[in-house]
Amino acid sequence: MRRTESSSYVSFMDLKSERASTEAVDVVVIGAGQAGLAAGYHLSSTDRSFVILDSSERVGDVWRKRWESLSLFTPAEFNGLPGLSFPAPPKHFPTKDEMADYLEAYVERFDLPVRLRTTVTRVARHGDGYVVETGDVRYLTSAVIVAMAGYQQPCTPAWSDDLDPRIHQIHSASFRSEADLHGRVLVVGAATSGAELAILSAQSGHETTLVGRDVGEIPFRIDGFLGRALLVRLVLRIGFHRVLTVRTPIGRRARPKILSQGAPRVRDKRRDVAAAGVEWIRSRAEGARDGLPVLADGRSLDVDTVLWCTGLRPDHSWIDVHVFGDHEPDHHEGIVDAAPGLYFLGLTFLHSLSSSMVQGVGRDAKRIVDHLVSNEALTPVTKTEQTEPVGGPAGL
């Protein structure tokens, strides 16, 4: 959606001209992943009414739909949201399905008002607050928490369209299992997902080439004795959570690089890639020639499958509020000064390197909810004279 001054404000007459029902609620949380549920937990201890909207069929589907062998690189002791520990031994590394089931149980445990199969199509200013539009219901609210990671749309280069149609192309966001791979496999992108899937490809019997620069790695085994006993705590609880933050000099220096290049690999090491028989070319795939991918040094690679591990980009086109810079919304620790009542949660390095991880969203959510509740300008819409839908008992 193109943002213009004329399209960023929704008037009462605009609302009257449409047919969707209208509901007033103090806070709308968009996204029922770990960030949105953590926000819901903290909101439930306030006097603010709220809903959590999500387009999925089930809570946790964002985890269930990832590749079959995926497991978290953080042990269970770091994977609990506020108020509920993860139900597994502390050193266990949960699978994606275990994480999905935990999120679903979290909603049931705290009776959070999640509304599934609800896609938000627009957020815009309305009076002193906001209107959140979905297919069937329009929400009038004083505050909106966008609780979504900054990864919605798969990134692939424009020249991918120039590859020979016989080459099967799939992005890591759509990859499910080895059955998605055919013949000789090229994995593009050597960060966490690229390294893991290149190893999986090779172990499945495919001739596999990994292309991409080395983003670095955590220099110990997270599932080894030393890693489990000490270093994971040191890295995750101290390094990611307390040292690398926007409030420390080292964190402020690291943040731009992490946002542009990604974090170092946590689980898979260079020697793991080599031991699996993967050929790792530390170069870039820069185009196509005669239907084949071409590297920066001019070499072309004859392959049957290209697995794109090139990341995902944010899609905030549905947020029709003027708060965006070049790469991310203009905020400080999730608080948007230019649009009081609008918040972001779950973004990479929102406050710290752990902000997009399960262990970090609870702290960020509490900070945002505390700010929301203490902001006297954010008048609760359900505490005013409006006790019926806008327009009176008959609605709009």
Image: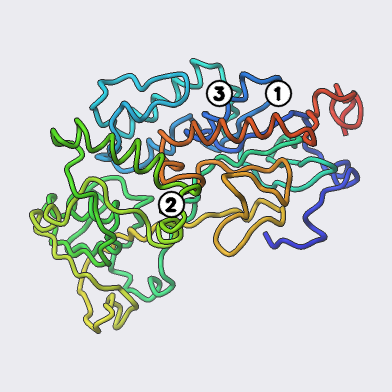
Q: Nearer the N terminus, badge 1 or badge 2?
A: 1
Q: In 3D space, how far apart are the residues under numbered discs 1 and 2 (Cα atoms)?
A: 35 Å
The number of callouts visible is 3
**Label 1: how many residues lie within 10 Å, few (<14), some (14-19) or many (20+)?**
some
Instruction: Name the residue that disc number 1 marks.
Output: 49
What is the three-letter code of the residue carrying label 2? Gly
* Residue 41 badge: 3
Who is closer to the viewer here, 132 or 21? 132
Q: Nearer the N terminus, badge 3 or badge 1?
A: 3
SS at mark 2 in the image: helix
Q: Residue at x 25, y 63 (%)?
A: 214
Q: Residue at x 44, y 36 (%)?
A: 360
Q: Nearer the N terminus, badge 2 or badge 3?
A: 3
Who is closer to the viewer here, 292 or 263? 263
Left or right, residue 85 beside residue 6: left
What is the three-letter code of the residue carrying label 3? Tyr
Q: Is residue 272 above or below residue 106?
A: below
What is the three-letter code of the residue carrying label 1? Ser
Marks 2 and 1: in contact by CB < 8 Å?
Answer: no
Q: Measured from the top left, where is residue 376 in percent x and y?
A: 78, 32
* Residue 251 badge: 2
SS at mark 1 in the image: loop
Q: In 3D space, how far apart are the residues under numbered discs 2 and 3 (Cα atoms)?
A: 28 Å
